[in-house]
Image (tube, rainbow, N blue to C red):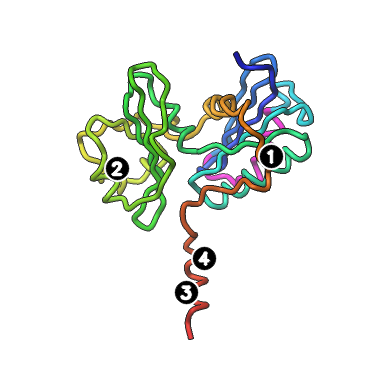
Amino acid sequence: MHRPANILALDASGDRSTIGVRAASGATFEAETDAGRKHGRDLIPAVRDLLREAGVRPMDLDLIAVGLGPGSYTGMRIGLTAARTLAYAAGARLVGLDSLEAVARNAPAHALRVVVVGDAQRGDVYAADFAREAPGAPLVPLGPSRIEPLSAWAASLPPETLVIGPGLRSATIRASIPGTADLGPDDPIHRPSGRRLIDLAMLALDAPAVDPDDLEPNYLRRSAAEDQWDARAARP
């Protein structure tokens, strides 16, 4: 049984910010910003409004959980900065979550094998694999989130795998998935929800404390801008 705690969970790794709040009473609240809006402008006001709806003061937060990606580099940095700032101000513990695992928890209870895919651009995908022993059993990660070429990822998909995730918005990724796989329905199953973020945060309630400065976004690779900068610097 979970001990009473005020929890805030947020993720800005996608095209919108997702927020969940669990009050010590056990009531859970969730919200998300509009797609395509600016995380830097909309995230903090959305957090403020949801905390107010939940009746939780920022200073009363016990735990703050933040999605570390993989996903949008800018979004991940904004989300982590916001979470760190709130954690320092409230004196709350801060933990990091895998954004793809939050999406995986949207999978229906009958799905035994689940793969979450994100568009990493440049012909690559972000991917994470999950499985459960029987319908309704806990969904367990089979390894950390990773980046790999789209062609190699699609070729290795086991039959009857449920594929979900933000990468399915890409027509190229969808066309690469073999017909033996099962594509999940349209949004919102393909993005994190505040309730699923809270579910993951609850699992971290009794985990060892982490120094907020030690948390970093899960970039998985350098940005294109960094590669271009190094290439220019290497020119004679």
Residue 127 vs 46, above or below: the answer is below
At label 3, counting other C-alpha atoms closer than 10 Å, the crowd grade (few under 14, some 14-19, many 20 or more) is few
Dot 3 amino acid type: Ala
Q: Position of residue 26 (x, y in %)?
A: 64, 15
Mark nearer the N terminus (1 vs 2): 1
Q: Which mark, by number, is residue 231?
A: 3
**Extreme residue toward the bottom, this view:** 236
- According to the image, label 1 marks what residue? 44
* Real-space Cα separation, disc 4 to disc 3, in angstroms: 9 Å
Observer-side mark, 4 or 1, equals: 4
- According to the image, label 4 marks what residue? 226
Let me know if residue 40 is in the magenta part: yes
Dot 2 amino acid type: Arg
- According to the image, label 2 marks what residue? 174
* Real-space Cα separation, disc 1 to disc 3, in angstroms: 36 Å
Q: What residue span does the magenta drawing correspond to? A: 35-50
